[in-house]
Image: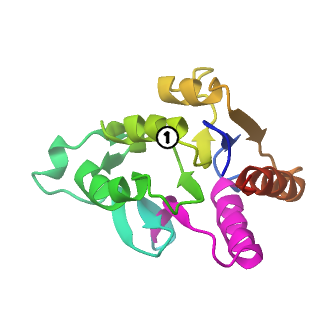
Amino acid sequence: MAGVGKCVLVTGPPGVGKTTLIMRLCESLKHSYPNIKLQGFFSQEIRHGGDRVGFEVVTLDGRRGRLASSTISSPEAHRWPAVGKYKVDIASFESLVLPELKIREDTDLFIFDEVGKMELFSSYFFPAILKILQSNVPLLATVPVPKFGKDLPAVVRLKNHPGATIFTLDKSNRDAAKEQVYSQLVGMLHKP
């Protein structure tokens, strides 16, 4: 297993391909290492008639749940925190994602897309990430670019973690970044 606190962070502007990169890395790792045990989730847009109406989280084993929506108008949803026009369904997020944050003996790598403002409304999410960083299980996560020049405090903590390697994705380096991140992960996965 990797050394304590090893993490790879992928950042870049919205729409640059962070989620696509994470999904391709998962596929490549599973192909190269058929017995690899991955835990985590990725976020996916929900579209209706060509318009984005929300986001869902998808676990690496295919389970899905709502993260945020702009179309829910239930009395309960009015109490949910908002990011822009989206109401964040913390209960749905936590019921699906928190079990994925549990450290298991056979887990080789945690993958989170993303550690962003919506996800951080869960008071349990970031403490679980910190616990993972204290384990010997490596972590691959996407983080947003700073908004108005300011990072989210949790993202600052991740970026400043002594075991963190940061890859900034843009349209010109997407393909090369996949190979670089893959090589970094493979190096972290080698057992002593």
Identify the image's colour scheme: rainbow, by chain, secondary structure or one colour.
Answer: rainbow
Residue 41 is inside the magenta segment: yes
Q: Position of residue 108 (x, y in %)?
A: 60, 59
Can residue 84 be seen in this snapshot?
no
* Residue nearer the viewer, 112 or 109: 109
Say left or right for 11 vs 93: right
Whether residue 73 is visible here, answered yes or no, is yes
Residue located at (18% from left, 56% from top): 73
* Percent x, y of residue 112: 53, 52
- Using the image, determine if residue 24 lies above or below residue 78: below
Residue 137 drawn above or below residue 123: below
Q: Residue furthest left?
A: 75
Q: Name the residue: 38% across, 35% down.
A: 127
What residue range appears in magenta? 18-47
Q: What residue do we see at 66% from left, 67% from top?
A: 26
102 or 148, nearer to the observer: 102
Secondary element at image label 1: loop
Number of marks: 1
Q: Amino acid at mark 1?
A: Gly
Q: Is residue 159 left or right of residue 132?
A: right
Left or right position of 75 against 136? left
Let me know if residue 48 is in the magenta part. no
Residue 160: image location, x then y, percent: 64, 23
The residue beneath circle 1 is 116
Pinpoint residue 34: horizontal percent, then vertical percent.
68, 79
State the residue in front, 133 or 62: 133
Tell me: 127 left or right of 114.
left
Badge 1 density bin: few <14, some 14–19, many ≥20, Cα 10 Å: some
